Amino acid sequence: MKRVFALTMGLLIGAAVAVGTQSSAQADGSIPCWSRTDALSYTYTARWEDYDWGGGWWNDNNVRDTSAHEGPDCSGLTFKSWAMVNSAGNTGRYYWSIGTDIHGPYNSTAFRNGCSGACYDVCGSGTGSACGSSSYTLTIAGDAFAKSGHVAIIYAESSAGWDWFINAAGESYGIQKQKRDYRMQTAYDGIRRMNWSAAC
């Protein structure tokens, strides 16, 4: 009985480790499926890592490796977390390992303006009006808020105009989980990636 229990526990622990390291072990390449859950798990691996303007890689060791120029900027984190193809407007899915130093073709303004057709506004629409607290019916975790100069993926929706983001907000902060009221600010549009998978 002890042997069966030990074998079962070993298999369960091995499976948990495999799931936890999938984002760093999987090779870059086209993928048939990428869900919001996948994106949020992937985004979370960047928490506590460094920020580098124009950057796109991190190593998930929870250390800010400034000397190695580690870290994505906000648009690089969004590009990789959304498993976007490195071709403007392409709505396909492409997995990038966290160690691959790629930023993608979009800056924050391009995200706000629709990623050349690879994403779209769900609220705000560049009208100068905030999405507002009523926009919770229009957004979901995995969507993002973008303005000229910044984009951040919603990690968890909250209330009263606030949400939790894994936020690549600048070199002095690194990548952090932060509560922000971006949906209440007129500069931001709520945006969504085209071609999400329902589940993988």
Image (cartoon, helix red, strand yellow):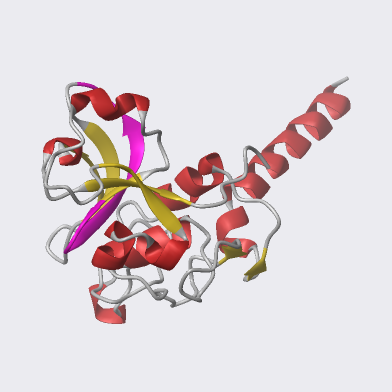
Given residues 39 and 7, the one toward you in this image is 39
Left or right: 43 in relation to 75: right
> Is residue 174 among the parts visible in the rendering?
no
Q: Name the main secondary structure of what is drawn in magenta.
A: strand
Left or right: 13 in relation to 62: right
Say if 16 sits above or below 89 in the image: above
Say if 5 sits above or below 155 in the image: above
Left or right: 62 in relation to 199: left
Say if 105 sits above or below 176 in the image: below
- The percent position of residue 98, horizontal first and vertical second, equals 49, 65
Given residues 33 and 53, the one toward you in this image is 33
Magenta span: 146-159
* Quadrant including the N terminus: top right
Q: How many numbered marks appear?
A: 0
- The percent position of residue 159, horizontal first and vertical second, equals 23, 22
The residue drawn where x is 49% and y is 45% is 41
**In magenta segment, residue 20:** no
The residue drawn where x is 26% and y is 64% is 108
- The percent position of residue 123, horizontal first and vertical second, equals 29, 40
Given residues 50 and 106, the one toward you in this image is 106
Q: Residue furthest front?
A: 127
The residue drawn where x is 68% and y is 42% is 200
Say if 45 sits above or below 172 in the image: above
The residue drawn where x is 11% and y is 47% is 128
**In magenta segment, residue 152:** yes
